[in-house]
Image: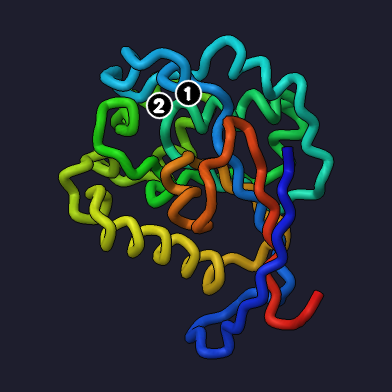
Amino acid sequence: MITIVIVIMNLTNSKQKTQDFPQIIYYMRHFQAKHNVDGKYLQVLDPDLTEFGFQQGFHMTFNDELDLIICSPLSRTIQTYLSLFHDVQKRQRIPFMLDADLQEIGEIPADTARSKEQLKQKFPELSSIIDRDLVEGFNDKNNSLYKNSLENVKQRISRFHQRLWEQRKEKHILIITHAGWLTRALNQREPSNGEIIKKIYTNSVV
């Protein structure tokens, strides 16, 4: 399911704007995870996708052109990426990043990521990317950067988008993240597992 929204923006005051608009962002919620169907997994650290969640990627085709994929560093979002882009050759053609600001906003175990070392052991094929993109302690929800307060979440979402506007020149970007993050970032209803919201950012009428 893809929802399309056109967003009119004016970034003329940005200090380091490198982006030429329009820019198309695909915001995606991860596929079905264990804690989405069984409440006992809410108290399990960083639960995996369900078997159905793993299969969702094999039954979904992403045909739109992509220049970059940015992903939350939790297991379910990384597994969503690997499932959706199960064709290794296709996956390797698209640059991939992890961003700690995309992790889920809750502080329960299910919304808390594994450590860098644990992630590297679980996803050895992404070890160099994990080392490149994540700092030690990124998963510490006591860190003021990631605490679940209204102001902290607002700052985290703003910080992430500011980097997009000021540092990234790619035109078509897929962001794989979580329901809580998306609900607050996009100011809308909670998306379903695997739902993609396509936004066209422009500073003129499309």
Above or below 17: residue 75: above
3D distance between C-alphas at marks 1 and 2: 5 Å
Crowding at label 2, few (<14), some or many (≥20) Cα neighbours within 10 Å?
A: some
Residue 28 in the image: state x and y as whole percent. Answer: 60, 42
> Which image quadrant is residue 53 in?
top right
Are the residues at dot 1 and dot 2 in contact (C-beta closer than 8 Å)?
Answer: yes
Q: Residue furthest toward the left?
A: 142
Check residue 176 in the rendering and tell me which mark sits there, or answer none.
Answer: none
Instruction: Give the position of the C terminus as an image quadrant.
Output: bottom right
Q: Residue furthest toward the top?
A: 51
Residue 40 in the image: state x and y as whole percent. Answer: 32, 13
Residue at the image point whose x is 57% and y is 83% from the top: 11
Residue at the image point whose x is 64% and y is 37% from the top: 195
Above or below 77: residue 64: below
Tag 1, which secondary structure?
loop
**Is residue 189 toward the left or the right of residue 135 in the image?**
right
**Is residue 133 toward the left or the right of residue 166 in the image?**
left
Q: Residue furthest toward the bottom?
A: 13
Crowding at label 1, few (<14), some or many (≥20) Cα neighbours within 10 Å?
A: some
Tag 2, which secondary structure?
helix
Residue at the image point whose x is 29% and y is 18% from the top: 44
Residue at the image point whose x is 44% and y is 54% from the top: 184
Above or below 9: residue 42: above
Residue 49 in the image: state x and y as whole percent. Answer: 51, 19
Q: Which residue is mark 1?
A: 123
> Which image quadrant is residue 136 in?
top left
Tell me which colouring the rendered structure shows. Answer: rainbow
Q: Amino acid at mark 1?
A: Phe
Residue 190 in the image: state x and y as whole percent. Answer: 52, 42
Q: Which residue is mark 2?
A: 120
Q: Amino acid at mark 2?
A: Lys
Q: Residue furthest toward the front?
A: 189
